[in-house]
Image: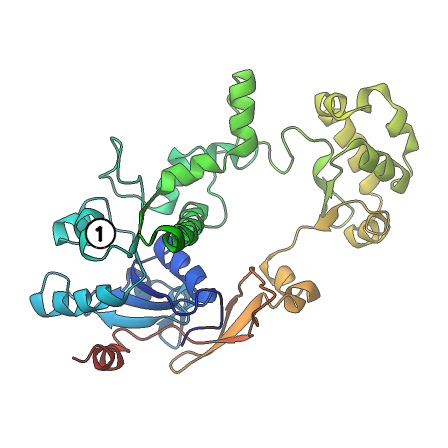
Amino acid sequence: MSLAGPLNGLLVLDLTRVLAGPYCTMVLADLGARVIKIETPGTGDDSRAYGPYINGKSAYFMSINRGKESLALDLKAPPDRAIFERLLERADILVENYRAGTMERLGYGFDTLHPRYPRLIYAACSGFGHTGPLHARPAYDMVVQGMGGVMSLTGHPGGPPTRVGTSIGDITAGLFTAIGVNAALYRRTLSGQGSKIDVGMLDCQLAILENALARHFATGEIPGPLGARHPTITPFQSFETRDGHIIIAAGNDALFQKLCAALDMANLATDPRFIGNQKRNQNVDALSQLMETRLKTGTTRAWLDILEPAGIPCGPINNVANVLAEPHVAARNMIVETKDPVAGSVHMAGNPIKLSDYADPHERAPAPELDANRAAILRELGL
């Protein structure tokens, strides 16, 4: 079931559910690893019950569990523990996203497993990591978006706290965990030893605060939401046009001068208020008003047709349907398809990592039904 990729030959035991952990193992599967998803008997991954549904099957679950195998095991029951331990003998990577301490209570924490399976890479992705005063607390995406400062930066000035429109708390944690796994694999090639990877969702939110964190350390200010503009680069924002909005990102003086020429507003390039990014940033409201007055005289498409040939970074604000219709998205194979025996043809996001040595097939193996691979896996184990 594995795709051809650089992780071919590696076996991942996936003890994760919902989003952060399954997103990590989806990335590993897209890179060629074989992923066996260990699920709770009877119910499986919680996200199997999350909508929307296609023919009664969760599109949410299918979108992040494609190409995996499913084996239902009760890790408190001796017969299932015996199966699990046979799998551990063969596994290269174990990924879990339980609350800290859960695997230890089951007898499968890293300190127990490492002496028995020294080459096993153990990746834990939890809300708050395995150390620190909050380590035992549960978390979901929105909890860490709020605690991690991201929601305080999102939205418009004076507005209520706003969640980022995608589950950035879960997804960043899944990506950082996948990065850690690949780093641990390289270390293992040198040392022969597996390691433990401990990723906390809250830590990941802090790690992506970038400009806000730099501003706070440099100035002591507490950054807040700015709507659709960059806090320290100007003009770098959304502007209103006659029929919608346009993003313009002039990230340096040369681009600003080109932008002024393209807008037929050459006077702005010599206006003392706007010479240099620091001055433009200090006078952002005045510059934005002048530019927007001009941009409202034309449609978004008309301005894109002027700005794009001039080399100005710009773009429309697409909704989901718009971005799916972009020819570039299709050309990059960023919408792939599975042929699910229950749901039929299902479309989902592709893999953004394009590798020169491996194909990027449009059709992928579907997400498994709960416990669908039990017979084949047990035969493989000689049970």
x 66%, y 50%: residue: 317
Q: Is residue 306 above or below residue 14?
A: above
**Circle 1 residues within 10 Å: few <14, some 14–19, many ≥20:** some
What colouring does the structure picture have? Answer: rainbow
x 30%, y 40%: residue: 129
Residue 297 x %, y %: 84, 44
* Image quadrant containing the C terminus: bottom left
Query: Is 381 placed left or right of 54 in the picture?
Result: left
Residue 161 x %, y %: 46, 35
Q: Quadrant of residue 119?
A: bottom left
x 87%, y 29%: residue: 269
Residue 244 appears in view: no
* Image quadrant containing the N terminus: bottom left
For mark 1, what is the residue?
114
Q: Is residue 116 above or below residue 224?
A: below
Q: Nearer the viewer, residue 18 or 375?
A: 375
Say which amino acid is labelled 1: His
Q: Nearer the viewer, residue 140 or 362?
A: 362
Q: Is residue 237 above or below residue 378?
A: above
Residue 11 x %, y %: 34, 66
Residue 338 x %, y %: 47, 76
